[in-house]
Amino acid sequence: MAGSPPPPPGAVAAAHVSLDPYVERYAARTHGMRASEIRALFAVANRPEVVSLAGGMPFTAALPLDSVGVMVADLLRTAGASALQYTGGQGDPVLREQITQVMALEGITASPDDVVVTVGSQQALDLVSRVFLDPGDVVLAEAPSYVGALGTFSSAQAEVVHVAMDNDGLIPAALQEALDRLAARGRRAKLLYTVPNYHNPAGVSMSEPRRDEVLAIARSAGVLVLEDNPYGLLGFDEEPRRALRARTSDEVLYLGSFSKTISPGLRVGWVLAPHAVREKLVLASEAQVLCPPTFSGAIVSAYLRTQPWLEQVKVFRELYRERRDATLSALAQHFPAGATWTRPTGGFYVWVTLPEGLDSKAMLPRAVHARVAYVPGTGFYADGGGGRHLRLSYCFPEPDRIREGVRRLAAVLSEESELRSVFGPHATAPSGSKDRGRRAQTPAPDLA
Ligand code: PMP
């Protein structure tokens, strides 16, 4: 580069030195795999003195663990040999039938034959990517988007094109524009990835009229919709919203999960696909895991059959509503002018926009030092955006801890703003363009 100073001695050689002796041998797709840069920081954030508003961990302590214990013992006593055996690659037929009944709560009519049981909906994301995405294919995804989905698309070497959203979810006009821009480049998107209910991380839901508009736009562009809906039954003051898949069966691949309504540790999710696609998904899944976890599936099946599971979902909803309220009132009380945030009507997350000039990633070490943690917005963008945003999860800490965490975070924000006003923008070391890569990060499981 003309005019740039010569590199210091050794710098050029150092650039080619890697500590990993296998680097030349990895498959190209591993270039898209990148551990979250903030993983190490979160090892600290998990210390008890830190209020973590980072992880999206369901509050499993609220489960009726004693009766679940009796249920699991009964299951082993009466059907242990089959519950501990391999099962078919598509998952147990009885469980698939029960899954169709769960989906009926959101207006979906489906045959158990079109359901594939997966290792959480995360495996379903991977299966759909394997079946539909070639390297370089375009996936449209909300801005921001669930970090685990971005990681999967990135591993499939797909290009993510973000589409703007607002308080009513994905913006149909922005979707149309994105499609037009792609068409002008001679490109077309294969999938539209959306989380229409209680979005992770944005905390908003797609409005009723937009659901039909988005489907109509996707249909006319020939784009399959990937509807990811782990939070749909966790609305606080409303009936479950009608799924996109309830409106059309041909153009939607629907992902569901028991992670938020029962337990993430069981790792039971599913994909509902058009009949023609289902077989490909089963073959892809068999190549990956042979069959979904039989024992976990049997536990879910017994839980749905013998326990008052919808009553328990209500317990979760009330618990999360109280925590959402604690978060919103603490934000209103402590956060400075210039910060804004979403007001979720269900789910786990509030998405915060910081006052102009603040950088959520640069601020994180200071926040952890002040004993509060969050996830910087950059993790939820495939294109380096999100620096002025952060995600707060209210699902796990008790309300008093949430209030304390938000108070601590507000103090960090004030210090950051003060530093900037005294010393200028460089005082808070913005995370800068250096790491504004196009590669998504792989989430740590407890941050997902
Ligand atoms: N999709 C979304 C939107 C999520 O928030 C999560 C978990 N945080 C997942 C998928 C994956 O969930 P699981 O694999 O536990 O079903």
Image (cartoon, rainbow, N blue to C red):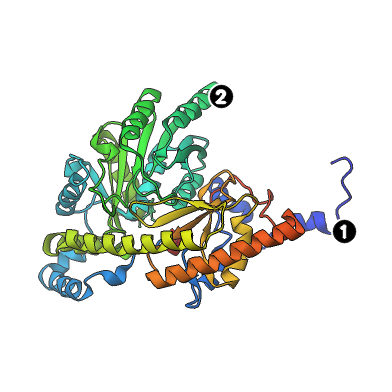
Residue at the image position 16 percent from the left and 68 percent from the top:
81
Name the residue type under label 2.
Arg
- Furthest residue toward left: 78
Label 2 element class: loop
Task: Give how far across and how far down residue 60 sits, in percent.
Answer: 31, 68
In the drawing, does residue 111 fall left or right of residue 138?
Answer: left
Q: CA distance from mark 1 to mark 2?
A: 43 Å
Q: Residues within 10 Å of mark 1 (few under 14, many from 20)?
A: few
Q: Quadrant of the N terminus?
A: top right
Can you say whether 137 is above or below 19 in the image? above
In the drawing, does residue 310 fall left or right of residue 56?
Answer: left
Q: Earlier in the sequence, mark 1 or mark 2?
A: 1
Task: Give how far across and how far down residue 128 sits, in percent.
Answer: 37, 42
Report which residue position mark 2 lands on. Answer: 185
Report which residue position mark 1 lands on. Answer: 9
Query: Looking at the image, is mark 1 or mark 2 nearer the viewer?
Result: 2
Task: Give how far across and how far down residue 416 sits, in percent.
Answer: 65, 61
Task: Give how far across and how far down residue 354 sits, in percent.
Answer: 57, 53
Label 1 element class: loop
Residue at the image position 32 percent from the left and 32 percent from the top:
209
Viewer-proximal residue, 223 or 107? 107
Residue at the image position 19 percent from the left and 50 percent from the top:
102
Can you say whether 188 is above or below 348 in the image? above
Can you say whether 121 is above or below 133 in the image? below
